[in-house]
Amino acid sequence: MPSDPHPSQITLAFSPEAGIVAIPFGEQHIKAQTALRACGFNRRPDGTYARQAADPEATRTVLASLADIARHHDTAVATATRRFIGDVADSTAHQLPGAWTANVDIYTLPDWQDDLHPYLWDNGELAHAVETTRTPYAAVLTLRDGVSLMLTEHPEADHDYLVGVFAPNGFSGHFADEPDAPRSIVIPTQPALAAQAIVERLLPDYRRALHDRRIHEVASALSWARQEQQEWQTIATSHRASDGMPLTSDGLSWHEDEFRDNAWNAFRDFVSHGHALFDRCQPLGPKSRETHREEDPAMERLRTALEDGKRAVAAWNTKLTELRETPRALPTGAYLQARARRNATAWPAIETWLADGHILIHHARNAPSALPTADLTTPRQTTVAALPPPPAPKDPPRRR
């Protein structure tokens, strides 16, 4: 775990617009902030401190005073060898296509930096640097559609920077050390060249990895839901639990409710990522176009199921909010009744997904964006196992 060599530190950088920018950090960073305020530095919204540097003589006086006051407050002062990272991020974001914003993040305590590691979606130098080297500050570049990049100074190259991606929203689990993650890149100080490297190398790798991850999420959910369906159908046919014990009608109803709850939870992955997968699906050649036409009815059924699923999820979220905000105690079984109505409403869409979901996975795996780009140096493959075939449809016993 990276640690600070000194409990109170200040790093100084120069910004043509802001002047001298100071970044306080360390376990005893309050001392650093006190020293900066005593020298006339003003705190900015991003947590940095700044003071104008238009007058060279006045600047030298301020820096000499800061050195003395920092020593009095047991604070180490260092001067960065490159310009303020916020300016680097702003100029790079300006060169990128689309509506990008740039903000400075300060990881005042080492623990704050440690919190970054699980959320970096990186299989390259950036994740390694964040894990092993103290990085008290970085910049975050964010595109309006939700793509977020982390830009930081390269710890082993005085004039280069590292940039990688944060894990996207809508996925579960940690992303650290994921072998199929995008690979962070080294970019130069020139904004135009840095933006070109991001557009031509990092973002295509990110989109490839994101598409593969969506396939993995939806395919894994479908595989699990189908296994649950097979187990339920065995129980429904034999009237026996998995341990062989005979079941009453109440026992059968309980197992059916459990299956439908599990199917709903898996179906939500399809609702979360289905639109993005549909957007990527397209015929690739004469044979693929012929197969695509034959499977179009299934794809249309899945599109309808997806739209129905979105409405069901929205309605369920609204219902949950309503239940949580009920001022009085809920009647016994109110949540269970609401959940049963949710499952009944969504069930036709879930059944469609269980029956035809593999068709979407097939098209998504053959979409161009799922393939490695020419810029990648390490081939990557989707690691999802083949899906089991959908079980033969059987009518479950009616509740008594």
Image (cartoon, rainbow, N blue to C red):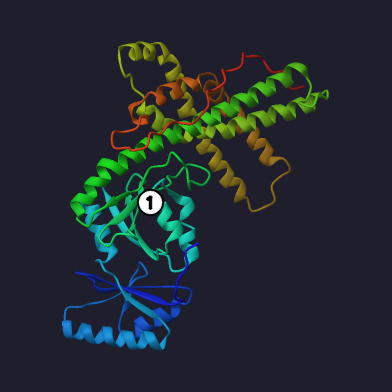
* Residue corresponding to mark 1: 125
Q: Residue at x 37, y 37 (%)?
A: 378
105 left or right, relative to 339: left
**Can residue 97 be seen?**
no
**Can residue 313 be seen?**
yes
8 left or right, relative to 51: right
Q: Position of residue 149 (x, y in %)?
A: 35, 51
The residue closer to the viewer here, 398 or 358, is: 358
Q: Name the quadrant containing residue 299.
A: top left
Q: Name the quadrant containing residue 46.
A: bottom left
Q: Position of residue 252 (x, y in %)?
A: 76, 25
Q: Secondary structure at mark 1?
A: helix
The residue closer to the viewer here, 177 or 221, is: 177
Q: Tell me the quadrant of the picture where the C terminus can be found.
A: top right
Vertical placement of residue 302 versus 271, above or below: above
Q: Residue at x 38, y 34 (%)?
A: 379
Vertical placement of residue 389 versus 194, above or below: above
Q: Position of residue 259 (x, y in %)?
A: 66, 29
Q: Position of residue 243 (x, y in %)?
A: 79, 27
Q: How busy is the neighbourhood of tag 1: few (under 14 within 10 Å), some, or many (20 plus)?
A: some
Amino acid type of the residue that numbered disc 1 sits on in the rendered structure: Glu
Counting the numbered discs, the total is 1
Vertical placement of residue 155 versus 287, above or below: below
201 left or right, relative to 220: left
